[in-house]
């Protein structure tokens, strides 16, 4: 069809119907013409856009013309291309010939964006309904935003929706994200460090991870900002600045709660929206829409209503039990460890507990399986330890753990050299074997007298010091090939616990494997497609951190298999410091302990340490006392307390080996007992939270509220102004204080709770 015929055919189309289908904007009859609520070009909402006699005009932006002019302006294309679109002739999508390598062509995203076409309303509507699960009503609303903001192209032979990624200020285009129209596959060009906003002019601005999530919110009138999966704390400040006088929320996918907590702790203006615990990891706003059954709008409002600010989140999730817990007794550690703990804690601004617990565990891993302690012939223990630091995100636990892990670098350096030498020797032996076997085969074929065939060299295995993440099968193989043992170090132990049996439909024996390894029990490990791996005297130490709200992850199955009973918990009070410190870790402290660990690692001669006579007497005295007092404790404490004598022996062994004692001395055992007292107190804190009643939880939170603020008197105004326990009004605040006085926490006078001084002592716990 020629150009003139194309124009004639295009102009025969009805302009009103075309605009409504193309943009989603509805035109209403007004006099002899039609009016729209919004202009499709300038988004002006003064009803200045209208149609009369097949011509359009906007009094706000001045754009006007016939149907061809409309499409030409709307799609930013030439008139003949606009005419072809109007009559439905296929126009080949742009297929760039420039390099696809975004590293070689940093401006490729600009090129793709410029030549892409505006996403039409009908295509957007179908995509939202068929690929994103929108119902017809919500899809129509969001399709309008799609046609305003998004484009379409067939770059790399796939028809894709093209989403612009703007700088966090919203001013500059910094990248694009292409989403496959059929398979929803995402490919980014430029950078993903930016945002795209669908602004509904709502009071609330909700920051989400994906484009689809932002469109879901826009469909119910909430301004949605997509940050394209780049969830970090650095970009929030700029986004906040872009939306002055608006309420800012973050609503990230399930499983990213730690990032949300870090953000709301840094930005007091921001509130976080969380999904329920029962939701699976990666569950997002789009998933909520799909299962809403037409109730999505009210669900969104409910989630926003329940959003947590930094203050209330801290109160709700800082699960600290009623009793006081001691600080780690670093005075009981040998000098190199004591100095290192103190300097790291001061440099990182965290409790010494965050350093001491992983440090003891790593020290155990360095000593390994070659050293044992024997209290009697039938009772021998290694020094393997499973430990966990319980602390909220941003408390300094991760930097402390990194500093402890770095102590292994000199050992790793030596192991790399050993591995390289062993590998070279193995490859040389393998080459000789292959040559010998070929000669043997030829001689045998010729009928020559031959001996038995040459044997292949022993397999080569890497020497390992520590591991961060591995399946049970791979850990078993590592332990079999590293009889001295290894230490597993995980910054986030929750993910490690959740990974148990994940490849076996939840029916595997991962937890049982770690139970038997803790005991040093010899056992076979089944391997897919391979013979079972037999472990003899395995040695594995484990350390890491877990957020307070994830303690239930460890609780699962604790009454059945004793997994929780084997963990030494450290749950110290956080440090609330607002001062800057120039303190740092001295080279001497780091070098001294690295040298110590290297010597311990290389001194792997088998040795059994027994007790001196005085130490044995002290052991018996402590053992009897421990057994008696344990029987008086709550049932939930019984099993882990039964493990404490073995834990004491393990810590005693660590201290004795570091001190190079031929026999365990009374002084070293006394120090180990003090450390075990510490872990018993912290165990009570952890298990107390897991087993507390609703009233006990309220008491604990009120006490912690007072202790944290050094308040002996709490007023109703204090409660509702700080949003303590989610209370935002005076009446429920007064009810809470009245209830607290009835529990014996304090005396109520004129809406003020005067705390009893003896209350703090009442919550002491001694074993």
Image: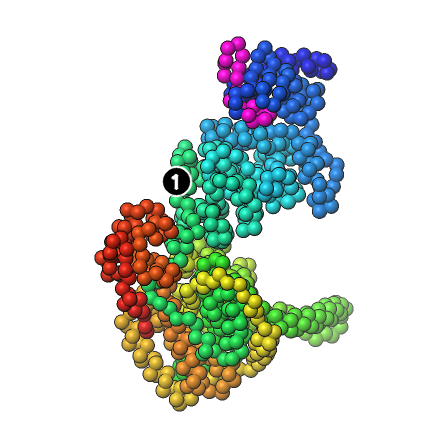
Q: Which residue sits at x=22%, y=57%?
A: 742
**Given the current orientation, which residue lies at the most extreme left position?**
742
- Kindly identify the residue that appears in the image at 53 percent across and 63 percent down: 580
According to the picture, the residue beneath numbered tag 1 turns out to be 302
Residue furthest bottom in the image: 613
User: Is residue 724 within the magenta segment?
Assistant: no
Please state the horizontal and vertical placement of residue 362, each as a whole percent of the image: 52, 71
Q: Closest to the observer: 626 or 109?
A: 109
Q: Tell which of 692 and 156 is nearer to you.
A: 692
Query: Which quadrant holds residue 552?
Result: bottom left
Residue 599 falls in which quadrant of the image?
bottom right
Image coords of residue 694 (percent x, y): 29, 55
Which quarter of the rendered picture does the C terminus lie within?
A: bottom left
Instruction: Specify how the rendered protein is coloured.
Output: rainbow
Q: Position of residue 241 (x, y in %)?
A: 54, 43
- At horizontal 64% and vertical 16% (from top left) the residue drawn is 65
Magenta segment, which residues?
28-44
Report helix, strand or loop for mark 1. helix
- Taking 255 as reference, is 455 left or right? right
């Amino acid at each position: 069809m020629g150009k003139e015929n194309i124009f004639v055919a295009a102009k025969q189309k009805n302009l009103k119907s075309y605009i409504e289908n193309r943009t989603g904007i509805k035109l209403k009859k007004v006099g002899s013409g039609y009016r729209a609520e919004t202009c499709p070009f300038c988004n002006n909402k003064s009803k200045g856009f209208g149609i009369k006699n097949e011509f359009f005009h906007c009094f706000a932006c001045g754009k006007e013309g016939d149907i061809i002019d409309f499409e030409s302006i709307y799609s930013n294309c030439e008139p003949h291309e606009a005419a072809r679109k109007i009559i439905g002739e296929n126009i080949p999508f742009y297929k760039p010939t420039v390099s696809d390598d975004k590293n070689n062509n940093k401006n490729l995203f600009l090129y793709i964006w410029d030549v892409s076409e505006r996403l039409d309303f009908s295509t957007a509507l179908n995509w939202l309904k068929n690929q994103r699960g929108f119902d017809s009503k919500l899809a129509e609303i969001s399709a309008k935003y799609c046609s305003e903001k998004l484009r379409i192209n067939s770059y790399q032979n796939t028809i894709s929706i093209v989403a612009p990624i703007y700088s966090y200020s919203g001013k500059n285009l910094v990248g694009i994200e292409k989403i496959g129209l059929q398979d929803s596959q995402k490919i980014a060009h430029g950078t993903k460090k930016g945002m795209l906003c669908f602004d509904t002019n709502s009071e609330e601005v909700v920051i989400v991870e994906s484009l689809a999530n932002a469109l879901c919110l826009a469909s119910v009138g909430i301004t949605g900002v997509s940050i394209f999966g780049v969830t970090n704390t650095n970009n929030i400040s700029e986004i906040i600045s872009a939306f002055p006088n608006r309420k800012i929320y973050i609503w990230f996918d399930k499983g990213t709660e730690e990032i949300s907590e870090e953000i709301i702790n840094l930005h007091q203006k921001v509130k976080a929206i969380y999904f329920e615990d029962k939701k699976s990891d990666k569950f997002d706003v789009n998933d909520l829409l799909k299962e809403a059954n037409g109730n999505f709008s009210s669900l969104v409002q409910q989630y926003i209503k329940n959003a947590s600010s930094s203050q209330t989140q801290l109160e709700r999730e800082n699960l600290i039990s009623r009793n006081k817990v001691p600080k780690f007794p670093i005075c009981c550690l040998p000098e190199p460890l004591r100095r290192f703990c103190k300097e790291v804690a001061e440099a990182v601004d965290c409790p010494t507990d965050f350093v001491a617990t992983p440090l003891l565990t790593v020290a155990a891993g360095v000593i390994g399986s070659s050293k044992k302690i024997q209290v009697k012939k039938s009772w021998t223990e290694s020094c393997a330890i499973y430990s966990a630091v319980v602390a909220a995100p941003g408390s300094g636990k991760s930097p402390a753990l990194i500093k402890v892990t770095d102590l292994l670098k000199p050992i790793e350096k030596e192991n790399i050299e050993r591995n390289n030498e062993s590998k070279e020797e193995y490859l040389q032996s393998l080459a000789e074997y292959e040559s010998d076997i070929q000669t043997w085969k030829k001689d045998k074929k010729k009928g020559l007298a031959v001996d038995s065939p040459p044997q292949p060299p022993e397999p080569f295995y890497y020497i390992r010091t520590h591991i961060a993440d591995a399946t049970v099968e791979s850990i078993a193989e590592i332990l079999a090939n590293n009889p001295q043992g290894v230490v597993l170090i995980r910054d986030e132990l929750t993910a490690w616990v959740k990974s148990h049996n994940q490849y076996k439909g939840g029916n595997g024996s991962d937890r049982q494997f770690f139970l038997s390894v803790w005991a040093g029990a010899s056992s076979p490990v089944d391997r897919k497609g391979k013979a079972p791996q037999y472990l003899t005297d395995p040695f594995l130490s484990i350390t890491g951190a877990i957020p307070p709200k994830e303690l239930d992850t460890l609780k699962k199955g604790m009454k059945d298999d004793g997994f929780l009973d084997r963990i030494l918990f450290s749950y110290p009070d956080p440090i609330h410091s607002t001062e800057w410190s120039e303190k740092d870790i001295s080279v001497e402290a780091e070098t001294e302990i690295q040298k110590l660990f290297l010597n311990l690692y290389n001194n792997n001669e088998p040795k059994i340490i027994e007790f001196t006579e005085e130490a044995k007497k002290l052991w018996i005295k402590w053992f009897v006392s421990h057994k008696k007092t344990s029987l008086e404790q709550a049932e939930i404490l019984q099993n882990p307390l039964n493990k404490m004598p073995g834990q004491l022996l393990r810590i005693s062994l660590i201290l004795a080996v570091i001190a190079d004692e031929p026999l365990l001395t009374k002084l070293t055992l006394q120090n180990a007992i003090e450390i075990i007292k510490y872990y018993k107190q912290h165990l009570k804190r952890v298990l107390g939270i897991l087993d507390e009643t609703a009233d006990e939880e309220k008491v604990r939170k009120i006490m912690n509220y007072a202790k944290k603020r050094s308040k002996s008197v709490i007023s109703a105004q204090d409660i509702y102004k700080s949003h303590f326990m989610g209370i935002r009004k005076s009446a429920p605040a007064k009810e809470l204080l009245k209830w607290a006085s009835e529990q014996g926490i304090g005396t109520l006078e004129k809406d003020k709770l005067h705390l009893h001084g003896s209350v703090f002592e009442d919550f002491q716990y001694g074993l």
